């Protein structure tokens, strides 16, 4: 695994790691996932994307239109926060003008994997004071996160 560096959309697609393609794992719900690819995140871990996660994303009409952006969002997010309900889960955010997309990355047995992707009106937990800015795990320079409070 190389050192993380931010990529644009095309570079992130090219940077996908296919070395674990076909390997399987069981998620927290007991569902079997098959890894399609992995991508290095700014938190210096590989996030694995499975066929089951992509199927789940298809249930979110707006987010499903951005499935090809998943490598870019994971590699070059605007913001990463812990999930206030489960701090081991990291939420990767990317804004597109008036749209904010969120990708929760869960962990089980030291394996980090995409659970889903969805559109959201705000950064989870900020408005409810369940999350403080001191808990942000990563902020891209220049990102105006207060817009999404």
Image (cartoon, rainbow, N blue to C red):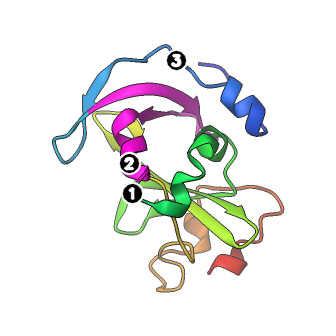
* Residue 6 seen in render: no
Judge whether 64 appears above or below 70 on screen.
Answer: below
Residue 135: which quarter of the image? bottom right
Of circles 2 and 1, the one toward us is: 1
Residue 34: which quarter of the image? top left
- At 49% from the left and 61% from the top, the residue drawn is 61
Picture disc at residue 59: 1
Q: Residues within 10 Å of mark 1 (few under 14, many from 20)?
A: few
Element type at mark 1: loop
Judge whether 50 appears above or below 3 on screen.
Answer: below
Quadrant containing the N terminus is top right
Picture disc at residue 115: 2
Of circles 3 and 1, the one toward us is: 1
Q: In the shown orientation, is residue 7 left or right of residue 72?
A: right
Distance from the alpha carbon under mark 2 to that under mark 1: 13 Å
Asked if the residue at tag 1 contacts the one at tag 2, i.e. Cβ–Cβ closer than 8 Å, the answer is no
* Residue 88 seen in render: yes
Picture disc at residue 18: 3
Q: In the shown orientation, is residue 129 left or right of residue 43?
A: left
- At 76% from the left and 33% from the top, the residue drawn is 10
Element type at mark 3: loop
């Amino acid at each position: 695994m190389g050192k993380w560096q931010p990529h644009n959309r095309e570079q992130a697609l090219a940077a996908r790691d296919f070395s674990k393609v076909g390997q399987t794992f069981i998620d927290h719900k007991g569902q079997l996932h098959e890894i399609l690819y992995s991508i290095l995140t700014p938190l210096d871990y590989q996030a694995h994307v499975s066929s089951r996660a992509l199927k789940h994303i298809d249930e979110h009409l707006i987010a499903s239109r951005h499935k090809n952006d998943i490598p870019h969002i994971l590699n070059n997010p605007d913001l990463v926060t812990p999930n206030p309900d489960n701090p081991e889960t990291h939420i990767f955010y990317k804004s597109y003008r008036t749209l904010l997309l969120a990708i929760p990355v869960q962990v089980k047995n030291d394996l980090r994997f995409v659970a889903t992707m969805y559109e959201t009106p705000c950064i989870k937990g900020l408005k409810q004071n369940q999350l403080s800015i001191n808990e942000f795990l990563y902020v891209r320079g220049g990102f105006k996160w207060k817009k999404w409070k």
